[in-house]
Amino acid sequence: MACRTICQLLQRRLASSATSVRLSAAEVRGRRSAVFSREQARQRSLYPRTEKIEVTLQIPGLQGTLLVMNKGLSTPHSCARHLTEWYVTSSALALVDGKPWSLHQPLTQSCSLSLLTFKDTDPLLVNQAYWRSCAALLGQVLLDAFKEDFSVELLRLPEVLVTSGAFCCDVVLDPQLDAWNPSEESLRSLTRGAQQLIHRDLPWEPLEVAPPVALEVFSHSSDTHLRCVFIHVYGTHTHSCLTLYLSLRCGDHVLLSGGPLVARTGLCSQYEVTAIHPLGEGKWGLHRRAQGLSLPLQQQAHHTVWRKLRSRAEKLVEVPTGSTNEAISDTLTLPSAPEQTPPHTPQQ
Amino acid sequence: MRLTIQMLISHGRVARKMGLGPESRINMLRNILTGLVRHERIETTRGRADEVRFYAEKLIDYAKKGDTDEKAMKMANFWLTEKDLIPKLFKVLAPRFETQPKAYTRMARIPNRENLDKAAMAVLEYKGNPFPPLQTAKRDNELTLINQLLKGYREQRAQQAAGTHWWVVL
């Protein structure tokens, strides 16, 4: 059922591709952000009257505490704000009735809530979410980094295990840049871009949307990449409701994710873009894998340890290539049109 | 000697004064050392524990020479006031520290004594004693992000080392 609507949308889109107007990157982002805000407002308007829900806390030391929150409006973040500042700053992810839940996603019914940090006895979920968020940040930095004349297209943000040493982001750059290999200076300027985003401490705002709306959000991208989204949307998500994780207010970047991200960019402290490896010719051009390494605020490493981990992160990380119908879904960011905003020139 | 002002100022003088005089100091240290050899973990004031440490380790060095050695037996006889501890020193403590070159004792500070004097206290023990450990090293959880990254790093290094083992020529 969902498949048919997607097929129809795609055909309509491809049929009208010849007459479509190329928009600048900023405009595309603005439109996406507008669609996102519209959808967010629509979802909020589903609860016209403030209804109360009961949230039971499952935090060590506060077991069984009952919080009375607003339905469709309160998030685990607001629950944490009712406690102490430590909970707000240290919690990275929430568990609602046993399911991983983003900190800024509204709660819709009475449930049990527990807040997860990096120092729990079992931080596996938090580690994976953090790795995904860092990859999303890397994707965002790459989109912003190049000049308007060069197109940057993000393919996917593959799900990598933490023990592999680095998070990855598959990119396709403009054909003019095929011969370009990043020098240390360019990697450092990318790192600086990421550090600026981290310093701004922007939250990742999630929104659950249905597939047609997701395709509408990304409708202004070029056809080849819409096909990529189509495969991703249709192939990886079997349930009708698709979770869309969006990053507003960082240049209005919007991205599609298969799992929850951590609360905000400020949770990362040490962040470095370590390498960009060419993967060879693929469907969309020369595929490249950008890799990075990061550690959160609560788990900072001594510089000797960091140097060793970084030298490991420079090596290419092999991602197990499965079919698109895998249960583990990748985070996908759609490319904007070829023109990009001017790069942040590092003040030297 | 000349009665100078310098005698009243003790800047840089490291030798501690204990008890009524040097002889009293040695007697006190002898008693504490006997208690340490008997119980292997004792609680005293910080200064006394620090002083005894030196003598405790020197005693073990003498005991390592063996009980047939004349000097070692004389030392043990002098320092241990309870003579049933001399066989314990030569037969239990000396063999325990055969492989170690030095550092036979451990000192840990504890809260001040509850008495009026509120003396700073310490616990002195011979390593390898049968009691539960004084301080357990706090290890961070294996599954934290940084530990997982380090685990991956160590595994990769081990793989590389195993991979290049064939090329090592002795």
Image: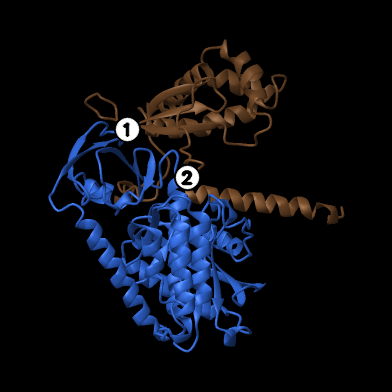
Chain colours: A blue, B brown
* Helix, strand or loop for disc 2: helix
Residue B154 appears at what percent x and percent y?
63, 50
Q: Give percent across and percent down for residue A7.
A: 48, 65
**Residue under circle 1?**
B120
Residue A194, image x and y in percent?
Answer: 42, 70
| Residue A164 can be seen in this image | yes
Instruction: Determine whether, in the image, residue A317 is placed left or right of residue A36.
Output: right
Q: Is B114 situated above or below A13?
A: above
The x, y position of residue B22, in whole percent, is 42, 31
Q: Residue at x 50, y 82 (%)?
A: A151
Among the 4 quarters of the image, the one containing residue B66: top right
Front-most of B72 and B32?
B32
Using the image, tell me which numbered label, if any, was put on residue A94. none
Residue position marked by numbered label 2 in the rendering: A124
Above or below: residue B27 compared with residue A252? above
User: In terms of depth relative to the viewer, which is nearer, A89 or A236?
Assistant: A236
User: Marks 2 and 1, Cα distance to the nearest angstrom?
Assistant: 44 Å
Q: Up-down: is A191 above or below B25?
A: below
* The quadrant where residue B76 appears: top right
Q: Amino acid at mark 1?
A: Ala
Q: Secondary structure at mark 1?
A: loop
Q: Chain of mark 1?
A: B
